[in-house]
Amino acid sequence: MVEFERSVSFVNITGEIAVLNIEELATLSKIVTDIQEKIALTHERDALSSHLYNLQNHADDLQAQLNAHQRAFFWRITKPARVVASGLKNTLKSIPGVGLVHKLLWHLKRFGWKATLEKISTRMMMKCMTTNKSLNGTPYM
């Protein structure tokens, strides 16, 4: 049976021969691993800091663009009309029939005639199916 040595010899930085036992090697190995982890975390932190810096610059650019639009002459002179239109729209939306018309017009503007008519017909068919009636008054099934 072969016995393993309980110590390791090596040449240290000063050129002297040093002898370490297994426990000291394990301690040094742990220290090296900890240092490597700290280096990796430092690199990750630096990358995240760089990314944060770029995002802050982008946010500053967007804020400058927004400020330029808000200072524009046309935007300032149309503010009263926009405030009145917004208030009127909110008031009209609260009226039951007008709110439905507003929703219809919004859907038309956003999706067009074809999609709006398809959605209306789908909703009507779903309503008929839930009440178990067809559009002409006879039972659906």
Image: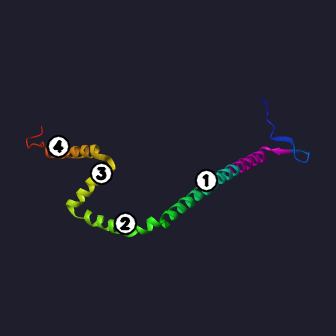
The magenta span reads 19-37
Label ID, residue 107: 3
Residue denoted by label 2: 82
From the image, state whether disc 4 or disc 3 is nearer to you.
3
Spot occupied by residue 57 in the image (x, y as percentages of width and height): 60, 58
Distance CA(mark 2)–CA(mark 1): 38 Å
Disc 4 or 1, which lies upstream in sequence?
1
Q: Which quadrant, please, contains the C terminus?
A: top left
Above or below residue 9? Residue 79 is: below
Disc 2 or 1, which lies upstream in sequence?
1
Spot occupied by residue 124 in the image (x, y as percentages of width and height): 19, 46
Spot occupied by residue 58 in the image (x, y as percentages of width and height): 57, 56
Nearest the camera: 53 or 12?
53
Disc 2 or 4, which lies upstream in sequence?
2
Above or below residue 67? Residue 33 is: above
Badge 4, how many Cα within 10 Å: few under 14, some, many 20+? some
The amino acid at mark 2 is Arg
Distance CA(mark 1)–CA(mark 3): 39 Å
Badge 1, how many Cα within 10 Å: few under 14, some, many 20+? few
SS type, badge 4 = helix
Left or right, 59 with respect to 74, comes to: right
The amino acid at mark 3 is His
Left or right, 133 with respect to 25, comes to: left
Disc 3 or 2, which lies upstream in sequence?
2
Disc 4 or 3, which lies upstream in sequence?
3
Residue denoted by label 1: 51
Nearest the camera: 55 or 25?
55
The amino acid at mark 1 is His
Residue for point 32% across, 68% down? 87
Distance CA(mark 3)–CA(mark 2): 21 Å
Label ID, residue 129: 4
Q: Is residue 28 magenta?
A: yes
